[in-house]
Image (cartoon, helix red, strand yellow):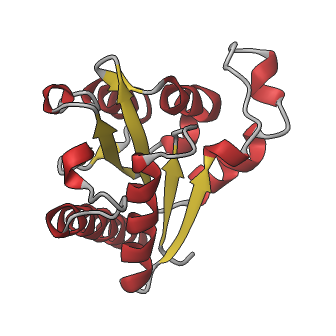
């Protein structure tokens, strides 16, 4: 199976800066000649996870398949109340084991610099529950990292490129290990 990176944009805001990060990551993946897909959750009818009926909702299975098939996943999310938004956590709750044994990275936007450790809670859950390999380099950006036109600063774009490179390198290494283990 060819290497692929799935980017999940978890913001439901129409003016989302984290979506801009997701778009930039997708371009960076494509520039590495790796397959990519950007899932914009504004376009998905996902239920809130109730641990039962929600898991059989018609939108859950296709998203689970996308995550399962991805070699690596990048989660783009705004930070609300010192944590990733509820949409990001809900996706993990709905898709569960699809996250197993794959690199996961984070692209985050926030209102201030004080929440920079916010991805740690979800990262710990993914690491402990599903043995996801959390990429220790993550992107944390605030409004000043974007121009008035909404474009990323050169420094922010370079940080996105670094995260994408780390995700692809780790996914390649895991694919090689799995191939030699067989």
Please identify the quarter of the rendering in which residue 159 is found: bottom left
- In front here: 76 or 4? 76
Which quadrant, please, contains the N terminus?
bottom right
Q: Is residue 76 above or below residue 178?
A: above
Which quadrant, please, contains the C terminus?
bottom left
Q: Residue at x 47, y 52 (%)?
A: 19
- Judge whether residue 82 can be spotted in this image: yes
Q: Is residue 39 above or below residue 112?
A: below
Q: Residue at x 41, y 47 (%)?
A: 18
Q: How many marks?
A: 0
* Lateral position of residue 64 relative to residue 36, left or right: right
Q: Is residue 146 above or below residue 153?
A: above
* Lateral position of residue 11 relative to residue 105, left or right: right
Q: Residue at x 47, y 42 (%)?
A: 100
* Lateral position of residue 92 relative to residue 74, left or right: right
Residue 129 rendering spot, x and y as whole percentages: 42, 27
Residue 30 rendering spot, x and y as whole percentages: 44, 80
Outermost residue toward the front in this view: 148
- Judge whether residue 75 can be spotted in this image: no
- In front here: 14 or 10? 14
Residue 89 rendering spot, x and y as whole percentages: 49, 27
Q: Residue at x 67, y 19 (%)?
A: 49
* Lateral position of residue 180 relative to residue 146, left or right: right
């Amino acid at each position: 199976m060819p290497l692929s990176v799935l980017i999940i944009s978890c913001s439901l805001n129409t003016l989302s800066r984290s979506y801009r990060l997701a778009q930039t990551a997708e371009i960076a993946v494509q520039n590495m000649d790796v397959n990519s897909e950007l899932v914009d959750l504004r376009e998905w009818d996902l239920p809130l996870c109730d641990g039962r009926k929600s898991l059989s909702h018609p939108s859950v299975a296709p998203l689970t398949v996308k995550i399962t098939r991805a070699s690596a996943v990048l989660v783009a999310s705004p930070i609300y109340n010192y944590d990733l938004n509820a949409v990001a956590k809900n996706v993990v709750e709905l898709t569960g084991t699809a996250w197993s044994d794959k690199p996961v990275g984070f692209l985050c936007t926030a209102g201030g610099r004080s929440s920079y450790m916010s991805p740690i809670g979800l990262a710990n859950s993914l690491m402990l529950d599903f043995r996801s390999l959390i990429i220790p380099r993550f992107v944390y950006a605030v409004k000043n990292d974007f121009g008035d036109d909404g474009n990323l600063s050169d420094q922010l774009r370079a940080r996105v490129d670094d995260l994408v490179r780390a995700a692809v390198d780790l996914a390649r290494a895991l694919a090689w290990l799995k191939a030699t283990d067989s």
